[in-house]
Image (tube, rainbow, N blue to C red):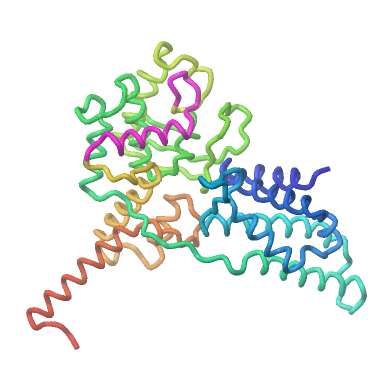
Amino acid sequence: MWWPNIFHANELRDAGHSYSHQKRTMSAVVTAFNWTFERGIDLEACIAAFEYLSDGDAKSLQRALRRNQGVADDDGGSVMVGPGYWDARCRAVVRYVRWRAGAAMHKLVRTEAEDPPAYLYTMAERQLEKFADGMLSGIPKPDEFETLGLDERQLAILRDAIEPGSTTNPFEKKHQFRNFALILTLYELGTRKGEALGLMKQDLSLHGPEPTIDIHRRQNNPDDPRARPPAAKTRARRLPISLALAHVLDVWLTEHNNDDERYPGAKRHGYVFVSELGRPIAESTVEAMFVTLRTKVEGLPPWTTAHRLRHSFNDRLSEAIDDQPDNVLREGVEQRMRNFLNGWSKTSEQGEHYRQRFIKEKAGSLLLRLQKLSAEGNSRS
C-alpha cells in the first residue's frame, strides 16, 4: 500500500477537486518524497514515529518546493515559481503529512490522565504543528492585483463578436453558433468554465415560461472521456434562465449539435457542448476560443478569459441590486443571493473579490460627488 495513492483517491479525487488541483497537489507530494529519498530519509517512517523533519530539513524541503521542476533557465540554473504557487506547494505537503499523521495518531489512546499514550499524543501534535510552521513560514505574500470584469464598452464588443455572422466574429463559420451558445451561457449565468462544460442535456429545461439550468457536481464520471474532466467546484443549484438564452441553447441542440456531418459522435453522449469531433468539449478548446477573441477582436483587453466573465456577471449583479430600493433587500439578503447564484456556501465572502470593478466605480463616483460638494461649499466638517 502506498499512502500517497490513498491520499489522492480519498482526499482529492473522491472529494471532487479539479484535475489541475489534483495534479498540483500530488506533484508537490511526489517532490517531497523524492527529496527525502535522495537524502536517505524515510518520510513514512518519520511520520509513523511522530518525528517528522528537523527544522533544517523542513526549510531545505521548502526551498526545493520553490524550484520549478524540470525547467531551467538559459544558463542551466533553477527557475523559481512565484510566491503564491510556492505557498500552495508547501501547504500541499503539510496537508499530506497532517493526513498521514492523523492515521497514526488515532491509534494512540487519549485519556485525561497524564499517562504515556496521552503524553505521546500531545507531543506528536506539537511536533506536527512545529513542522507545519517551519514549512509555511518565511514565504513572501504574492503581489495583489485587482481582478476586474470587462466594462460595458468591452462587453458590448464581446457580445457583437460572438454573434453568428457578425463582421467581427473571428471563429470558423461552422463553429460560430456553438461558440455563441457557450460564451453566452458563461456571460448570462456567471458560471465557472468547468460547470458549463459539465452540463448535460438532462440538466436543461428549455421549454415553458420559466426555463432553468441545473448545475451539478459529477466528479469521476465514468462516462466522461476527457483526459482532463472539467469540475464544478461550487455547489449544485438550479438557475433560472432568460427566454432568449433558452432559445439559443434549444437552437444549438436541435439544429447544430445533432448534425452528424458537423459534429459526428455528438449523439453518443449527453453533454451539451461538443468538439468538432462530437466529443465533450475540452477546457483547452474553450481557452483557445478566448485567445482568438482577445487577439483578433479589436477593443478586447489582453486578459479577456472565461473566468473574467464571472467577474463581469457579479458586476452586473451588483448594479441590479444597487438599483433596488433600500427597503427591498434586508441586511444579509444580498450576500445570500450572490452566494446562491455563484454556488458558494451561505456564509462565503468571495463576493467582495468578484465585484471589484463595481466597488471601484462606485467609490470613484462618490469621491467626485464629495469634491463637487466641497467646491460648492456644501461639504460637511
- Specify the quadrant of the image occupied by residue 365: bottom left
Q: What residue occupies the far bottom of the structure in this picture?
A: 381
Question: Could you say where residue 105 lies in the image, as x and y percent from the top left?
Answer: 83, 62
Question: Could you say where residue 338 lies in the image, as x and y percent from the top left?
Answer: 40, 55
Q: Which residues are magenta?
A: 274-298
Q: Describe residue 93's horizontal placement relative to residue 265 as left or right.
A: right
User: Dividing the image into 4 quarters, which one contains the N terminus?
Assistant: top right
Q: What residue occupies the far top of the structure in this picture?
A: 261
User: Dividing the image into 4 quarters, which one contains the C terminus?
Assistant: bottom left
- Specify the quadrant of the image occupied by residue 23: top right
Q: What residue occupies the far right of the structure in this picture?
A: 116
Q: What residue occupies the far left of the structure in this picture?
A: 376
- Specify the quadrant of the image occupied by residue 130: bottom right
Q: Is residue 326 magenta?
A: no
Q: Describe residue 213's horizontal placement relative to residue 164 as left or right.
A: right
Q: Residue at x 50, y 65 (%)?
A: 141
In the foreground, 133 or 14: 133
Question: Could you say where residue 211 lies in the image, as x and y percent from the top left?
Answer: 37, 35
Count the marks: how many? 0
In the foreground, 272 or 117: 117
Q: Considering only vertical position in the picture, is 189 above or below 90? A: above
Q: Considering only vertical position in the picture, is 315 above or below 373? A: above
Question: Could you say where residue 270 lies in the image, as x and y percent from the top left?
Answer: 51, 25
Q: Residue at x 29, y 59 (%)?
A: 358
Q: Residue at x 46, y 33 (%)?
A: 284
Q: Residue at x 89, y 67 (%)?
A: 109
